[in-house]
Image: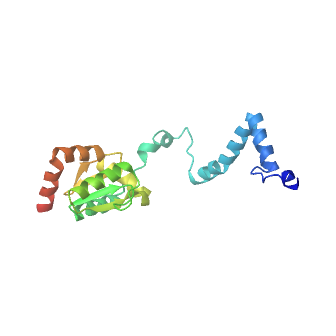
Amino acid sequence: MALRSIKPPSLITPAAAAVSSSIVNKPQSFRFAVNNLHQPIYIIRSILTPRLKPSSPAAKFRCSASSALTPQLRDTLEKLVNSEKVVLFMKGTRDFPMCGFSNTVVQILKNLNVPFEDVNILENEMLRQGLKEYSSWPTFPQLYIGGEFFGGCDITLEAFQSGELQEVVERAICS
């Protein structure tokens, strides 16, 4: 009889039950709680991001006025792209791609036994944004062969399937 009177441990504490019941019964308080959770992020963003007055001319052209591709970054990219025959700017590394598209290009290059330099664009936001301007290509991965931009995942995949990629790589490596 004593065993039947013992209650199993509850996973929900009385305080958690009160909170969960108030959320279910009062959707307004749930919305309020969510907004309060995001408030510190908004405060941090407002401190870190300078606000432009809507009437200022720079406010209208904020995106186009700032260039991530500085002359120093352009020089660095040119040296990097020309330092190796094949360079892949990707999300992650050849050993640990962090994007399916980057992984596809890595597998294609490995399949062709192409020696290549991989550059993880996730480690440096300035590099990532500057490279978009440098190549005039908005997405990653970006493959450079012989110092020239070749393409992204779709173009590389099509060229691999048609045999064109192997020809381009062989020409670049032999030169």
Left or right of 161? Residue 127 is: right
- What's the colour scheme? rainbow
- Seen in the picture, residue 94 relative to 54 is either above or below; the reply is below
Furthest-bottom residue in view? 83
* Residue 30 placement: quadrant: top right
Residue 115 at what x, y percent from top left? 23, 63
Residue 150 at what x, y percent from top left? 23, 49
Whether residue 15 can be seen here? yes
- Seen in the picture, residue 73 relative to 35 is either above or below; the reply is below
Please state which of residues 70 and 158 is positioned toward the viewer in this rendering: 158
The residue at the point 31 percent across, 50 percent down is: 104
The residue at the point 30 percent across, 55 percent down is: 106
- Seen in the picture, residue 164 relative to 126 is either above or below; the reply is above
Left or right of 124? Residue 46 is: right
Please state which of residues 92 and 6 is positioned toward the viewer in this rendering: 6
Whether residue 68 can be seen here? no
Quadrant occupied by the C terminus: bottom left
Please state which of residues 53 and 138 is positioned toward the viewer in this rendering: 138
The residue at the point 35 percent across, 55 percent down is: 90
- Total tally of numbered discs in the picture: 0
Residue 159 at what x, y percent from top left? 20, 45
Left or right of 152? Residue 173 is: left
Residue 34 at what x, y percent from top left? 68, 43
Please state which of residues 87 and 30 is positioned toward the viewer in this rendering: 30
- Seen in the picture, residue 115 relative to 47 is either above or below; the reply is below
The residue at the point 25 percent across, 58 percent down is: 110
